[in-house]
Image (cartoon, rainbow, N blue to C red):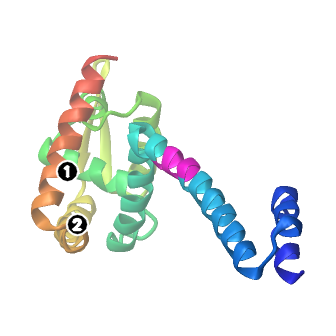
Amino acid sequence: MILVSIVNDSSTVRKYKEAESFHLLFIVLCVNLYMQMKWGLRKMCEENRLLTRCLYFTASRFARNITKLAEKTFDADDLAPTYLYLIMTVRFHPNITQKELCRKLSIAPSTSTRFIDKLEKRKLVTRTASGKETNIALTDEGEKIYKHFRESLEVLFDRYSAILGPEFSADLSKMLHEASNKLEQNQ
């Protein structure tokens, strides 16, 4: 009776009433459990197949995880990693135009304005107007932040390489870069 109450399936209860022995009941319950598990696995397999095949879902999930790791690694006050990459880009391209900065970082002009405003307020970059263009350059304080960030990049690479493996990490980074370039070209 206890076994029947565990399985709330009327067909199983009916089969139990028809069963002449405990062994037969056990077989009925095992078959029923097997069928429920098989159905559950089929649904789970379909869900996993759909999620792992979806580049949007998988890339977003990966981005959230790598962002958590990056934020733990980059100890730069309250600057998010995106600000640090902007500083790095300005470091490699002194007096870069805001338009070119947006292109290199794949960000909207309004986003870059917001970022530059914050960095300028913290005296990490300077902004100068040159005709219709705005040029961005690092300050000495911005240079210090860049040097610390550059060291942190090596730590980040070591951390995710320890998890994913160095060769896989390098290959994945290269493939993501190439895929991003292709997607940007076709938008």
Are circles 2 and 1 on residues that touch, CB within 8 Å? yes
Of pointers 2 and 1, the one earlier in the residue sequence: 2
Residue carrying label 1: 172
Residue 176, position in %: x, y? 23, 42
Relative to residue 57, is residue 8 depicted above or below?
below
Q: Is residue 123 left or right of residue 104?
A: right
Residue 125, position in %: x, y? 30, 50
In the foreground, 176 or 119: 176
- Residue at the spot x=23%, y=25% of the render? 182
Q: Is residue 183 visible?
A: yes
- Residue at the spot x=39%, y=50% of the render? 120
- Residue at the spot x=57%, y=56% of the render? 38
Callout 1: SS: helix
Q: Is residue 43 magenta?
A: yes
Callout 2: SS: helix
Identify the magenta region.
42-48
Q: Is residue 120 left or right of residue 145?
A: right
- Quarter of the image with the N terminus is bottom right
Give the amino acid at mark 1. Answer: Leu
Relative to residue 73, is residue 82 depicted above or below?
above
Give the amino acid at mark 2. Answer: Leu
Relative to residue 141, is residue 173 depicted above or below?
above
Residue 94, position in %: x, y? 15, 42
In the foreground, 171 or 103: 171
Q: CA distance from mark 2 to mark 1?
A: 10 Å
In the foreground, 135 or 75: 75
- Quarter of the image with the C terminus is top left
- Magenta stretch mostly in which secondary structure? helix
Residue carrying label 2: 164
Q: Quadrant of residue 16?
A: bottom right
